[in-house]
Amino acid sequence: MSEKKEIVLSGIRSTGNLHLGNYFGALRKFVAIQDNYDCNFFVADLHALTTSPDPEALHANVKNIIAEYLAAGLDPEKSTIFIQSDVPEISEMYLLLNMHVGIGELMRTASFKDKARKALGLGSAADNESEEAFEKEIIGAETNKRVNAGLLTYPTLMAVDILIQKATKVPVGKDQLQHLELTRRFARRFNNFYGVDLFPEPTDFDFGGAPVKVPGLDGSGKMGKSEGNCIYLIDEPKALRKKVMRAVTDEGPQAPDSPMSEPVANLFSLLELTSAPEVVESFRKSYADCSIRYGDLKKQLAEDILAITTPIRERVADILADDAYIANVVRRGAEKARERAAATLSEMRHIMGIRKF
Ligand code: TRP
């Protein structure tokens, strides 16, 4: 008696290598749920094109992420692992769904505003300029500083990734929740408009427990590609140790039981993710009694991170050397992903009145 498993889907933009934030925040959890869900993990290379159109870099990044997915334990025997652009049905559905998406709602999306400002060289939105001024900037922009239309319709494409597979559980980070909300809205809108029940409304996958916080090494904020504060899964030991040793700290606790500054608290967060509880505890004690030496903490942290990343890095190298294996994995993944995508697209076309004579 095989109960139907819930469909889980998540993607990652191919804009660089995977870092510890991706690992603890996503990959490690994906690996853990592969047996219990119908898992679909893909590389969002079309999404990457919205901000990084360099062809050689795009191709290399897609390959790297597939290798990193596999090296971290995603298993093509259990999960469907594919590349977004290998599923042309996604591009067609993107066109169709866009007919039911408003440019206003897209322009109000936080990620669009951020990326549009970057494209126009406007700096962050901290200064409370009006919507109107911002819109004027976009419409009046010189063509060499344009905000590309792909950036605007990014949420449509993401909704399509999800809806075309009829996925109901979508593990995403906080920064993607608004896109997921839009996906639900588009699904509901389409269903209501045509009086059908085609798309289920997806929700965030709840892994339970507190969300994992993976800070960067620069003293503030989370680890992120664009922050330049990352430890990558494929960092060589020497480079990795150097990065950790250079992490921002402070002048040390000045009195017993002092509160921790953000940079130091961040190092402890990383230590908690990677080190044994006794190790964390002993550094907490030495912080509390002011005997701590940050250099010792960093050395320990670097070695404990390496214990996690070294086997992954070694597997990445093996996989990258085996083009035939990678090709085989993504070909099988695309076949599986296309099967469901084609079925959904065909229903959608029919519902919308695109029918054969
Ligand atoms: N936008 C997501 C990100 O930047 C990547 C993504 C694209 C995605 N399509 C998706 C995530 C579908 C989940 C489901 O992180």
Image (cartoon, rainbow, N blue to C red):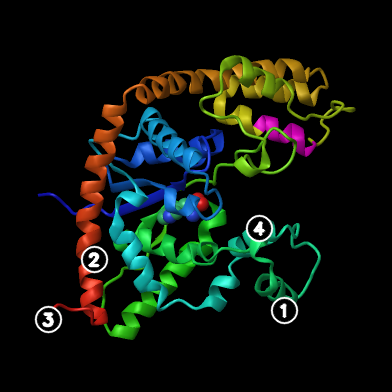
- Assign a secondary structure to mark 1: helix
Q: Amino acid at mark 2?
A: Thr
Q: Amino acid at mark 1?
A: Glu
Residue ID for mark 3? 357
Residue ID for mark 1? 132
- Estimate the x, y position of residue 348 in percent, counting from the top left: 25, 73
x 51%, y 35%: residue? 18
Q: Please identify, in this view, whether the residue under mark 1 or under mark 2 is nearer the observer.
A: 1
x 21%, y 71%: residue? 347
Q: Is mark 1 within 8 Å of ligand 1?
A: no
Q: Quadrant of residue 151?
A: bottom right
- Estimate the x, y position of residue 206 in percent, counting from the top left: 43, 52
Q: Is residue 152 magenta?
A: no
Q: Earlier in the sequence, mark 1 or mark 3?
A: 1
Badge 4 local density, few (<14 within 10 Å), some, or many (20+)?
Answer: some
Secondary structure mostly seen in the magenta stretch: helix
Residue ID for mark 2? 344
Badge 3 local density, few (<14 within 10 Å), some, or many (20+)?
Answer: few
What separation in Å lies between label 4 and label 3 (alpha carbons)? 45 Å
- Assign a secondary structure to mark 2: helix
Q: Which contiguous range is marked in magenta? A: 261-268
Q: Earlier in the sequence, mark 1 or mark 4?
A: 4
What separation in Å lies between label 1 and label 4 (alpha carbons)? 18 Å
